[in-house]
């Protein structure tokens, strides 16, 4: 055991103290170039360390996208390990955006890579895909409970293609996305102040009143900033569940780098707009 409080408890406290903002660490080639960095391991390391320096003591959540590190092989993964370690040491919660999904022992191995207390990439939560069936996630659910970590399950994503699966109707009349939310509500039953099993729900999706988003866990909401959604949109999308939303902003903040002060100022502006929107909702 790690001795950690449940992820939901730690996330609720971080959101209340630091504001409900998640900043992505997405070092894709065009952003490295915008920062005047080469698209190589040295550029990757400079980018990651700058984001962690600017954000880790201030925002509730940092969310590295593992693919942008993995493309550099072992040296890129080493940079990711360091970024995760330093971000958590500075007080930010780290959600590893890896979107893993498989069955049996393979799913267990994915979970151990990010949620086991001794893993080099040990993170506070992991994004996972349930589209081999929600039950395929059981090894990750079990390990998260054991280690005080959490999951964010892809439920209603912001990409246009997602609807062909997530809005599909099951024989019981519910959509696939609604079914995932119902599974998460069961995982979070009785957990206070917030469950540890969250959903990924896009902030760009408009009116979602036909879905029960108040499922006792956090809602990781991509789409703020460059994808077109604004903090003011949050109450209309998430309704009474808006207080449990963790809005994710990546390019909207990161484009202000590499200047640390400019990055911090951008994050603070988003955080304040989100606070106002949530209070109004």
Image: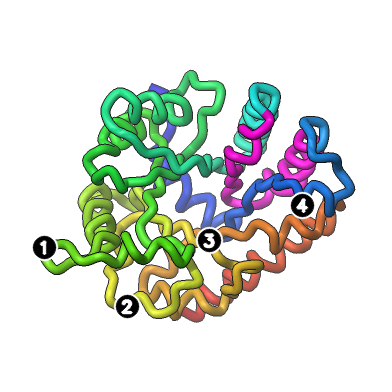
Q: Which of marks 2 and 1 is in front?
A: 1
Q: Does the magenta stretch include residue 257?
A: no
Q: Which of marks 4 and 3 is nearer the N terminus?
A: 4
The residue beneath circle 3 is 222
Nearer the observer, 238 or 167:
167
Residue 166 horizontal/vertical position (percent)? 32, 61
Q: Distance between the residues labelled 4 and 3?
A: 18 Å
The residue beneath circle 1 is 171
The residue beneath circle 4 is 31
Q: Are marks 2 and 4 in contact (CB under 8 Å)?
A: no
Q: In this view, does 247 lie to the left or right of 190?
A: right
Residue range corresponding to the magenta coloring: 44-72
Which SS class for mark 1?
loop
Q: Which residue is drawn at 29% across and 61% down?
A: 177
Which SS class for mark 4?
helix
Q: Distance between the residues labelled 1 and 4?
A: 44 Å
Q: Earlier in the sequence, mark 2 or mark 4?
A: 4
Q: Which mark is residue 209?
A: 2
Q: How far apart are marks 2 and 3 (CA)?
A: 18 Å
Q: Are marks 2 and 3 in contact (CB under 8 Å)?
A: no
Q: Quadrant of residue 265?
A: bottom right
Q: Which of marks 2 and 1 is nearer the N terminus?
A: 1
Q: Which of marks 4 and 3 is in front?
A: 4
Packing grade of label 2 (10 A; few <14, some 14-19, many >=20) is few
Residue 71 horizontal/vertical position (percent)? 64, 34
Q: How far apart are marks 2 and 1 (CA)?
A: 21 Å
Q: Nearer the viewer, mark 2 or mark 4?
A: 4
Residue 89 horizontal/vertical position (percent)? 64, 32
């Amino acid at each position: 055991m790690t001795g950690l409080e449940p992820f939901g408890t730690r996330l609720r406290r971080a959101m209340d103290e630091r504001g409900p903002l998640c900043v992505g660490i997405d070092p894709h080639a065009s952003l490295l170039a915008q920062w005047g960095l080469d698209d190589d391991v040295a550029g990757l390391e400079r980018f990651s360390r700058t984001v962690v320096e600017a954000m880790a003591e201030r925002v509730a959540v940092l969310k590295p996208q593992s693919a942008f590190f993995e493309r550099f092989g072992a040296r890129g993964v080493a940079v990711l390990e360091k970024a995760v370690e330093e971000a958590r040491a500075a007080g930010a919660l780290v959600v590893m955006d890896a979107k893993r999904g498989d069955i049996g022992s393979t799913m267990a191995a994915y979970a151990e890579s990010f949620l086991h207390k001794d893993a080099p990439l040990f993170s506070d939560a992991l994004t996972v895909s349930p589209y081999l069936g929600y039950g395929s996630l059981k090894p990750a659910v079990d390990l998260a409970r054991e280690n005080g970590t959490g999951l964010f399950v892809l439920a209603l994503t912001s990409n246009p293609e997602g609807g062909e699966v997530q809005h599909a109707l099951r024989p019981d009349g519910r959509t696939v996305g609604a079914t995932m939310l119902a599974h998460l509500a069961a995982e979070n039953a009785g957990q206070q102040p917030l469950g540890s099993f969250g959903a990924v729900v896009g902030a760009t999706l408009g009116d979602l009143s036909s879905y029960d988003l108040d499922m006792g866990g956090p809602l990781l909401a991509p789409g703020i900033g460059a994808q077109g959604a604004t903090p003011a949109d949050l109450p209309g999308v998430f309704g009474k569940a808006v207080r449990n939303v963790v809005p994710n902003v990546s390019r909207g903040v990161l484009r202000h780098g590499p200047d640390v002060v400019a990055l911090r100022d951008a994050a603070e502006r988003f955080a304040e707009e989100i606070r106002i929107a949530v209070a109004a909702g």
